[in-house]
Amino acid sequence: MPYVLGLRCRECAREYEIAPIFTCEWCFGPLEVAYDYEAISGAISREKIAAGPASIWRYSDLLPVERNPAVDLGAGFTPLVRADRLASELGLGEVWIKNDTLNPTNSFKDRVTSVALSKALEFGFKTAACASTGNLANSVAAHAAHAGLRSFVFIPANLEQGKIITTAVYGGNVVAIDGNYDDVNRLCAELAGMYPWAFVNVNVRTFYAEGSRTLAFETAEQLGWETPDHVVVPVASGSLLTKIRKGFGELHTVGLLDEEPKVRVSGAQALGCSPVAAAWLNDTENIKPVKPSTIAKSLAIGNPADGYFALDAVRQTGGGFAAVTDEEIVDGMRLLARTEGIFAETAGGVTIATLRRLADQGVVRPDERVVAYITGHGLKTLDAVADQVGPTATIPASLDAFHAAFDPSTFDQ
Ligand SMILES: *Cc1c(COP(=O)(O)O)cnc(C)c1O
Ligand SMILES: [Zn+2]
């Protein structure tokens, strides 16, 4: 790994060797991978990236993994779709959807899992594990199966049926816990101290988190090596938002962007689990843990590990936050489907509903180039819309019945 210097504490900057560790012994701050950006600048180029695979691994010079081949199901390089119909509904100008529903297990979590499990193999782990709000469970189970690793994934028992099936099908161990995500996470922290397992969001979280930066790298590349003016990002632990912001800056540091990016970053949460949005709205640094109650289960982390960093990123870049109701979430899912043909899960509904709120408030402006991150597929959370959509008409198989149901004078001739 020529381009990684080691690990560095995000609080006190103390340095550590590369290892499956995640907190500073000195101050208990979270650790982060430190890169040799000068060496990366010398090695990386737009042409080299363009010649790479159509996956996150086209940015391998910027990822903390030396294993080749990596644990790879093809995560990343998902479409960036211009969304003019959505933009006009929202009174905005240039809007793009980063469609991360089209990953191998249909959520952005494949990016972080692919990096974390590649690193886990390097470290010699034989078992992969995670605490999950649903999508990480899908992704870890699939990537572990592909890599021949044993797996234990821990989920809240009240998860959507769709997410349990799409995890269990891969044949690993799925452990449903009688409790919410924060309970699951607490158990996993104990287990991680006991067994030599790669918990992707505990002891290898430092590496896991780095995978999210590829969403910024791809967005810039797909915009012709330019950056958006404003991005809207869903927030669970706050890691994704923090790392997207970091990724744009790194592209400039290594010489891939001509100008220093000025990307405003806004965060999206569901009202039923909005500890970070609440801190922003109340203008405080103090993030109060909550007990989640929302249909956006993939974002239902009541005590977000990176909440403070996400809050700081939104403040520093002049973005905003919204906390949207379950009703707005479903409306957001349906709006995106109706205007752009993209079916997102509830987290995508949170993002679109937040975009709508921030547009109404003038926080996201019509003169901005906006990217909304759609991070999970609608087939995972069918229940959210099941009682709202169905056949337009149910009729006998006759022309008369069809013409009785639909006025032919309105048809194209
Ligand atoms: C996990 C997840 C997120 C955000 O995750 P962070 O914990 O904030 O990094 C966003 N959308 C979906 C669909 C997710 O599964
Ligand atoms: Zn420290």
Image (tube, rainbow, N blue to C red):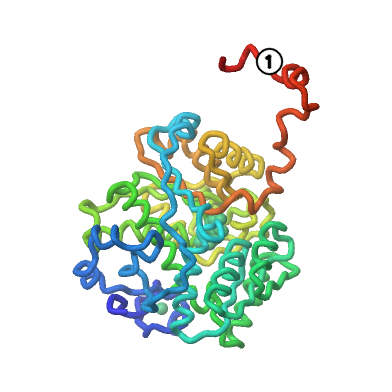
Q: Is residue 360 left or right of residue 163?
A: left
Q: Is residue 280 left or right of residue 398?
A: left
- The reply to whether the residue tagged 1 has its Cβ within 8 angstroms of ligand 1 is no
**Mark 1 nearby-residue class (10 Å; few <14, some 14–19, many ≥20):** few
Q: Is residue 299 left or right of residue 68?
A: right
Residue farthest to the top? 409
Q: What is the number of callouts on the image? A: 1
Quadrant assignment, res 47: bottom left
Please name the residue shown 30% across and 73% down the image: 35
Q: Nearer the viewer, residue 303 or 106?
A: 106
Please name the residue shown 73% across and 61% down the image: 158
Please name the residue shown 43% across and 66% down the image: 211
Residue 17, percent across and down? Answer: 37, 85
Mark 1: which secondary structure? Answer: loop
The amino acid beneath tag 1 is Asp
Quadrant assignment, res 353: top right
Q: Nearer the viewer, residue 354 or 286?
A: 354
Q: Please tell me whether residue 86 is drawn above or below residue 137 in the rendered image.
A: above
Residue 234, percent across and down? Answer: 52, 52
Residue 88, percent across and down? Answer: 46, 29
Q: Please tell me whether residue 51 is drawn above or below residue 40 in the rendered image.
A: above
Badge 1 is on which residue?
Answer: 407
Q: Nearer the viewer, residue 47 or 158?
A: 47
Quarter of the rendering occupied by the C terminus = top right
* Quadrant location, ligand no. 2: bottom left
Residue farthest to the right? 396
Residue farthest to the front? 398
